[in-house]
Image: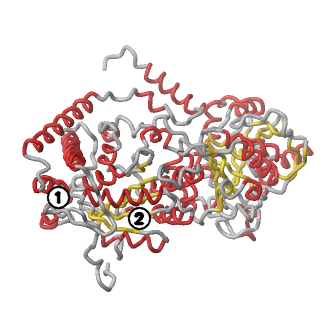
Amino acid sequence: MAKPPGKPPAEPEFVQLLTPDGERVEHPDYKVDFTDEEYRGLYHDLVVVRRLDAEATALQRQGELGIWASLLGQEAAQVGSGRALRPQDMAFPTYREHGVLYCRGIDPVMPLSLFRGVDQGAWDPIKMKFALYTIVIGAQTLHATGYAMGITMDGKVGAEDGEAVIAYFGDGASSQGDVNEAFVWASVFHAPVVFFCQNNQYAISEPLERQTRVPLYQRANGFGFPGVRVDGNDVLASYAVTRAALDQARVGQGPTLIEAYTYRMGAHTTSDDPTRYRIASEVEAWQAKDPILRVRRFLEHNGLAEQAYFDEVDEQARMEAAHLRERVLEMPDPEPLSLFDHVYPHGSPEVDEERARHASYLASFAGEAH
Amino acid sequence: MDTVTIGKALNLGLRRALEDDRKVVLMGEDIGKLGGVFRITDGLQKDFGDDRVIDTPLAESGIVGTAIGLALRGYRPVCEIQFDGFVYPAYDQIVSQVAKMHYRARGQVRLPIVIRIPYGGGIGAVEHHSESPEAYFAHTAGLKVVTCASPNDAYWMIQQAIASDDPIIFFEPKRRYWEKGPVDPVAEPYPLHAARVAREGRDATVVAYGPMVRTALDAATAAAEDGRDLEVIDLRSISPLDMAPVYESVRKTGRLVVVHEAPSNVGVSAEIAARVTEHCFYSLEAPVLRVTGFNVPYPTARVEEEYLPDLDRVLDAVDRSFGW
């Protein structure tokens, strides 16, 4: 198919506070003011999140998970935005927000049961302030917007202790009708929601050029709210931009679209083979912009941490990963008849009848050798 | 006891639901100032405010998708889809999200959402305004599907649906909106998911729902003149189906005709025929027969009366059952 005429999307300009070399730079609109301990904390989160992700990939390769959607390369976008959330805020993830989940203080083993096939999520989104993983691309952006409308209706917006919502999605989802409808709804109802798009350059195999002819953050203009692009491999900038957008939402300033410009270093999922659609040199170029390495350089250059500290974090990450693995291997398979549970809050005589029939079918094998 | 139209009964039911629970919100296109294209929400925005009777942007997936978010927040959204043929943009949110989130969360999420859909033909409309898509939804576990055929059921069933924590697709027989009947706002309502014998009879059973209940009752009146005593059952609930009254009736009459406007292929009547065959095999004097719309796209207005089951086609099926 012919490509449209005209220039391809321009090279990005974005909000950056930490260069790939680990140099702190200032931005007129976005600041961070972290203590030494907080800087180290961000490094810790990034390392642990990457290590847990590697463990999950390994578990899949060993047949212990059915599939895994790796976040490799997107740690800064997730840790930065995840740490920017205040306790009262609500997050609506895709199926890749393992780093955000970790930053919410949620046990990282929680989504593993889904990828193992033991359940389909099975957590309480309200208690966790973290909605269920949503596999249909973009559907959750409407849920986030409706939830945000509810915050307004509850009168919980308009002050510094107000509530806000963050909706995660990707560059591929930006083409979905639901995402565009969510933008319309959020705009006309002035909903306290932040749309956080991790532009990791690929929707499985399709490059960004197949989704858009304009930088994604500029889409917001047409819907009537601000859009901003941030270096998604810069945890400081991701934090600062998200925190500002959430705080604007909670005080009643309405929605923001954030495009976190990043790169999916791994495959779409463990079922994918990215060598079929992208070249090694591209991956290598992004390797140089690694989100963790730049924080480490920053800590080193500024005397905030030494080798002993980095070793200690690696050890903590290794232990967390081992603990994760242990619990994945212990996950019991669900009882066969549990597939009839929770179809309806009030139950259904039809489901009850099928369950009873299948139970007696299963019982008919009782005593037979397996 | 007041005599009102089905449309007014729905309006009164919605009004009472808004009064009874401040978490109930109505959402839809043109439902506010205009009161809906069929005026089902007439006057409700004026009395309850535009936070509770919300005129939405024109995007059905957005209506249902944001209703999910509101439900997660503790609200009880009642969505109006303006016409049957406009529900499909919301199909993904209904089938993949509304229907499955409770299951996905292993019971830790409830989405008490009602999706109202005026359905069926007979109003001389253009394309997409006369369809009967109930089978699509009845096929999906996690949704319950109901439809009303009288003002009293309209008044009560909409309130019961809103009070239920199950997600419910509520089909309204649009061409019957203007039919009048009594509403009893005091008497204990009939259970939401129960079928009801609308007319007792001995000789053959006719099962119908929604707009076809009136047609079936008219057919029974006509058949009585020929000395045939038809029993008419109003299903009311399409998912789950309440089959006990159907089995009981078929065991008595030995003959069953199922009537709906939707096409027959893989439809509600096929499901009923299968179940009756399984449960009443030795009681049947003839195969279960179906009187339905044809397996074509809903036709243009000038021929829609050919498409829609009517009294004569129901009686013809009854004749065929007796002639077997």
| Image coordinates for residue B299, horizontal then vertical, percent | 68, 67
Quarter of the image for residue A323 reads top left
Tell me the amino acid under the disc marked 1. Answer: Asp
**B15 and B243: which one is in front?**
B15
In the image, residue A228 sits, relative to residue B66, either above or below, namely below
Residue A280, relative to residue A88: is it above or below?
Answer: below
For residue A103, what is the image quadrant? top left
Which mark is first along the chain, 2 or 1?
Answer: 2
Q: Are marks 1 and 2 on the same chain?
A: yes
| Disc 2 element | strand
In the foreground, A205 or A251: A251
Q: Is residue A355 visible?
A: yes
Given the image, on which type of amino acid does mark 2 rest?
Leu
Expressed as whole percent of the image width and height from the top left, the position of residue A197 reads 36, 61
The N terminus of chain B, quarter of image: top right
Vertical order, B283 against A196 (above or below): above
User: Is A320 left or right of B100, judged from the image as shown?
Assistant: left
Residue A282 location (% of width, % of height): 16, 67
Residue labelled with disc 1: A290
Label 2: chain letter: A
Q: For residue B61, which quarter of the picture?
A: bottom right
- Which chain hosts label 1? A
Residue sitting farthest toward the top: A367
The disc at residue B206 is none
Answer whether residue A205 is visible to the viewer in this image: no
Quarter of the figure that contains the C terminus of chain B: top right
Q: Which residue position holds label 2?
A: A257
Q: Of residues A71 and A359, which is closer to you in this image?
A: A71
Q: Nearer the viewer, residue A85 or B191?
A: A85
Direction from residue B228 to residue B174 in the image, left or right: left
Q: CA distance from mark 1 to mark 2?
A: 24 Å
Name the residue located 35 percent from the left edge and 43 percent from the top edge: A104
